[in-house]
Image (cartoon, grey):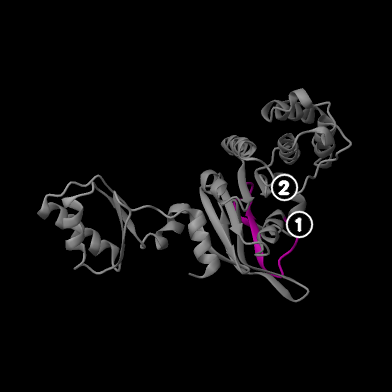
Amino acid sequence: MLLKLKGVTKEYRKKTILEDVNLKIEEGDILGVIGQSGSGKTTLLNLIAGFIEPTDGEVTYLSKVTNEERSLTKNLHKIKRHIGFTPQHNSFYPKLTVKENLWHFGKLYKVPSAVLKNNIRNLLNFTKLIDHQNALAEHLSGGMQKRLDLSCSLIHKPRLLLLDEPTADLDPILQKEILHLLQEVNKQGVTIVIASHQLDSIEMLCNKIAIVHKGKVHSHGLLEDIQKPYLKEHFTIKMKQGQDKERLLARLKVLPIQKIVDNGHSLEIYPKDIQKTMNSILEIIREENLYLHDLDMRKPSLNEIFEKIATGK
């Protein structure tokens, strides 16, 4: 465990933004935080970063020195140098060059000059900004500016990197480039927490997900664990048109099935009890000697799960 939120509530002017949040961030995780606008995602990131204090509850981190949990708020002066933060909007200085920005942020984190020079050189190469190091930040393309923002938050070699909408306003190709960069950052031992509306990107990048809904963490954990409650809806059978399909349809009509959707070469089956129906279908296929191309118990996408939670359906 790297960091933990225990019963955390945050209020602004007597309005509850987050309520009773319990969340663990394990070392090495890439945790994706998703939710509708105004759900509390950015507030959650700010609590993890120590920028704001909980109204109730506690944010703790695991001390590598004593191997004990300590309050983030009370020890922020010790822990903040281990945290990097990339906000949604550019945090660099547009009138400074790429290299000057990195030097400035390195000095803010009190990185010694000799170490800072080495860190800058490594980051310029790592983020492919080396050929743009003397360019003014405002003259960089959108993708290069995102790389600079990321570099500024990594200049002090943090253990934990927090990102708020890092791929917003980027085209699909640039999004993939930034996501690949984050994967490489994680491989170097940096734990990442990323808040984003780009659910396809979150699903591809993250090993764990936290879904924030109406100020609460509705679900969190491994993606496969979050998918489990939503697996019980339907499955697809693929087979050729003709007698085999007609014989199967005739037998399916006596099973406890809510709906069958015939898509030509496939049948979407919506059972009342997926396991019993699945066993019955396999028995029918064996008895009737039917030829089955494929049986797909498709896992729902993060988009589908999020839509169900957001709409309450």
Q: Report the Cα–Cα distance between label 1 and label 2.
A: 10 Å
Residue 212 horizontal/vertical position (percent): 59, 63
Q: Amino acid at mark 2?
A: Phe
Please identify the dominant SS of the magenta region.
loop
Report x, y in % for residue 116. 78, 31
SS of the residue under disc 2: strand
- Residue nearest the observer in this picture, 154 or 264: 264
* 68 lies above or below 184: below
Which segment is the magenta one? 50-69
Q: Which residue is mark 1?
A: 51
Could you tell me if the residues under marks 1 and 2 are in contact, i.e. CB atoms within 8 Å? yes
Q: Is residue 124 magenta?
A: no
Q: Nearer the viewer, residue 284 or 69?
A: 284
Three-letter amino acid code at disc 1?
Phe
Residue corresponding to mark 2: 85
Number of numbered callouts drawn: 2
Q: Quadrant of residue 129?
A: top right
Residue 292 x, y percent position in the rendering = 21, 47
Q: Compare residues 292 and 206 and report the one nearer the observer.
A: 292
Sequence-wise, which precedes: disc 1 or disc 2? 1
Q: Quadrant of residue 97?
A: top right
